[in-house]
Image (spheres, rainbow, N blue to C red):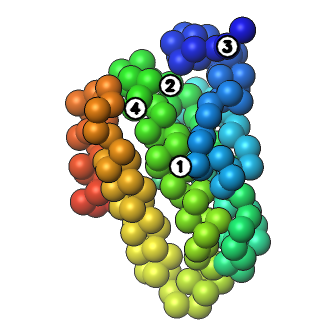
Amino acid sequence: MKISYQDAVTFPFTRQEFLDHVNFKDYGIYVKRVSYEPLHANQRVIRPKMATLPSPLALFFGKTRTRSTIYVFPRAFNDEDTEDDFISNLIEHEGEHARENYESPTSLWRLILKGRAKIKDASIQAEKRAFLNQMRKSKGRNHSQGHMTSLLAGINTGIS
Ligand SMILES: [Zn+2]
């Protein structure tokens, strides 16, 4: 039986199964694994909805053609979001990070040598690009107002 997005929202125990069957299409080759991460109650406030972790070789040494792991946290299944919002965040935002990690990873060592400000700046620029990618692909989709507002904020500031 295929788990629907609504099932995954309602029944947290189905979320990993749901994520295992999301079709990443063109982004599939950049993603090693999508992992649902249930959290303790006191972690909920500070965690993002989703996060993408490059392979250690990409992260530290800038090695290309390695796949990333995407972590999905409970907030991602917030019931104010539409299914299109969720898929936009998962594939066109996190998948875009995974694509960059695969094709043109930024070596953390190189950034460290350049100084702390460079690390923050690189991360803000990567966020802006991912939000822009989401916006470009949003036409004709069923997005909530909140989603579109956070895309606009993200494109401008790198933070949603
Ligand atoms: Zn991001």
Residue type at mark 4?
Asp
Give the residue at x 25% y 51%.
153
Q: Which residue is mark 2?
A: 77
Mark whose residue sits in front, 2 or 3: 3
Question: Are circles 4 and 3 on residues that touch, CB within 8 Å?
Answer: no
Mark 4 or mark 3: name the one nearer the start of the chain. 3
Q: Amino acid at mark 2?
A: Phe
In-image side of 131 versus 47 (left or right): left
**Extreme-bottom residue of the structure:** 113
The residue pinned by badge 1 equals 94
Residue 85, labelled with which disc? 4
**Mark seen at residue 160:** none
Respond yes or no on whether mark 1 lies under 8 Å from ligand 1. Answer: yes
Q: Nearer the viewer, residue 100 or 69?
A: 100
Instruction: Give the class, few, some or many, for how many residues have Cα within 10 Å of label 1's Cα (few <14, many ≥20).
Output: many
Tell me the SS state at disc 1: helix
Residue at 33% across, 31% down = 141
Q: Which label's residue is closer to the chain start, 2 or 3?
A: 3
Residue 59: give x, y in percent of width and height: 67, 70
Estimate the spatial distance between the alpha carbons at disc 3 and disc 1, rounded to whole Å: 23 Å
